[in-house]
Image: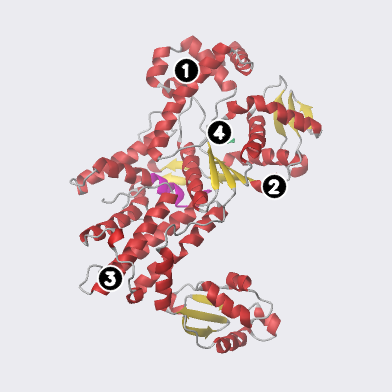
Amino acid sequence: MKTKIAELLAEKIEGFDVEKVEQLLEVPPKADMGDFAFPCFQLAKVFRKAPNMIAAELAEQIGEQDFLSKVEVKGAYLNFFVNKTIFVQQVMERATEPGYGKSSMGEGKTICIDYSSPNVAKKFHVGHLRTTIIGNSLYKIFTKLGYKVERINHLGDWGTQFGKLIVAYKKWGSKEAVEENGIAELMKIYVKFHEEAEKDDSLNDEARAWFTKMEQGDQEALSIWQWFKDISLVEYKKTYEMLGIEFDSYAGESFYCDKSKRVIDECNAKNLLEESEGAYIVRLDEYNMAPCIVMKKDGSSIYATRDLAAVLYRKDTYDFDKCIYVTGLEQKLHFAQVFKVIELLGYEWAKDQLVHVPYGLVSLKGGKLSTRKGNIIYAEDILNESVNRIKEIIAEKNPNLPDKDDVAHKVGVGAILFNDLYNQRIKDVVFDWDKIHNFDGETGPYVQYTYARAASILRKRQMTEAQIPGNIDCSVLTDEASIALLKEINRYPEVIKTAADRLEPSVVARYAMAVAQAFNKFYHDNQCIVEDETVCNARIKLLSVAKGILKDSLGLLGIECPEQM
Ligand code: ARG
């Protein structure tokens, strides 16, 4: 419809093509102001007339059109009211085509998303939960748009901390304790190392020596390190399983040790390296940044070296169109430095293909979460607590619900995901259980509940989606609430594109919420199961389309929908 209106206007306005008009067309804030509005301010110069006169003239030239019920002049605006019957029919046709919302814009293009990436031998904390959730949602969004996405878990599995861990293990650890308590035990001996090293600095030398051994390929050092890594991965994978998340690659920092040489060679070839305070750096003063440390004096790599190597490796391996990094805001400088160095190496694509996607902090309202110790919140704890709280709510409100545990899982996890993704990612996230789990609030459970409600109406009608007749006269759906819901449905493909453009899953989360609200209003105003077969069928059909979109859009956030709640 928008395109049709734009075509009509472009014909009448010299120098304006369809695309330009389409960009100018607005959606008025209120339905009584029409479905689309065209502001004529920009035309004043072209026509050398007052905008309101231009609007009036255009209205006259447009005259009657069968897809429009009315064209109204309101000051400098031309307001278009589309023919509802045609609009309804069109949206329903479009939205019931298979794969509604999909696009081919990404065909033949690859996007690497580097996300989650926890640090081995450390527990997965809520910060890592955010990158995991945001990264996973971006993966789903880009996949929907036809891109091939490589999901990369750039594990923090290399560095001097492993030298410390080996020393700590040899001095105070035991195989049994590590096997029994996993990461918790590794964290315990790591803390012990730091306490002891305060008193005895030689421990640090020992740790460095062990890390050097690792870098030189020492069998013993590497087998302990590998064991710690395996143990950590078992725990991470439990969290991933809980979230329904998978990766295509677990090539973490260790994978790039032997690829650092290329980075150093290329830096040297471009004369970029400078020795400074016992390290090799690339100066970035010209770009208002601190220097990027590329190599330690002893030749060992650091975090940035491994990231530089990873960029080059991924470009060769995946030939990406974009490589996206999802981490906390505190790594902004790190990525700016890495991207700049790649550019200075002569890779022009670094400018627009390497993208850092930062996010804000996580906090807990009232600190009521039962954390084990200290104020670090672990992902596993917060997910379990959410699921348990939902279990309690179910036990109290709906004890006979079938598949209670499965529902509690989907709702408990969904509530955390939705809360994380509902606001722009740069904003901080607060865990306030009463808010997150409020079934009437702007929450995951509210949207899921709306979905379950739609599912239950279909059950009542004893109809599966497949049984809804294909040729339905939808012209009865012209009441305000139905139209409002259809307008939301109509927006879906555009919403997904905007979310991808802005790298913002919140665009989809807000949308899912808007569809749920529009659905509830529709359902409140319109009885679905009525005598009149035509009306009944049309409403059921709209209901089932909305239901499908609720599920699909929540799916883009990584959230599942139970059929009953
Ligand atoms: N392991 C890092 C951390 O926990 C995040 C890694 C992000 N990805 C990267 N390529 N540097 O802070």
Q: Is residue 423 magenta?
A: yes
Amino acid type of disc 3? Asn
Q: Is residue 190 visible?
A: no
Give the magenta-colored segment's residue range: 416-426
For the residue with label 3, is its CB less than 8 Å from the closest atom of ligand 1? no
For the residue with label 2, is its CB less than 8 Å from the closest atom of ligand 1? no
Q: Nearer the viewer, mark 3 or mark 1?
A: 3
Residue 425 image point, x, y percent: 51, 49
Amino acid type of disc 2? Lys
For disc 4, the marked residue is 154
N-terminal of the pair, mark 3 or mark 2, is 2
Q: Secondary structure at mark 1?
A: helix
Label 1 packing within 10 angstroms: few (<14), some (14-19), many (20+): many
Q: CA distance from mark 3 to mark 2?
A: 53 Å
N-terminal of the pair, mark 1 or mark 2, is 1
For disc 2, the marked residue is 351
For the residue with label 4, is its CB less than 8 Å from the closest atom of ligand 1? yes
State the mark number for residue 189: 1
Q: CA distance from mark 3 to mark 4?
A: 51 Å
Q: Residue at x 74, y 30 (%)?
A: 281
Label 4 packing within 10 angstroms: few (<14), some (14-19), many (20+): many
Q: CA distance from mark 1 to mark 2?
A: 43 Å
Q: CA distance from mark 3 to mark 1?
A: 63 Å
Q: How many marks?
A: 4
State the mark number for residue 526: 3
N-terminal of the pair, mark 3 or mark 4, is 4
Q: Is residue 264 visible?
A: yes
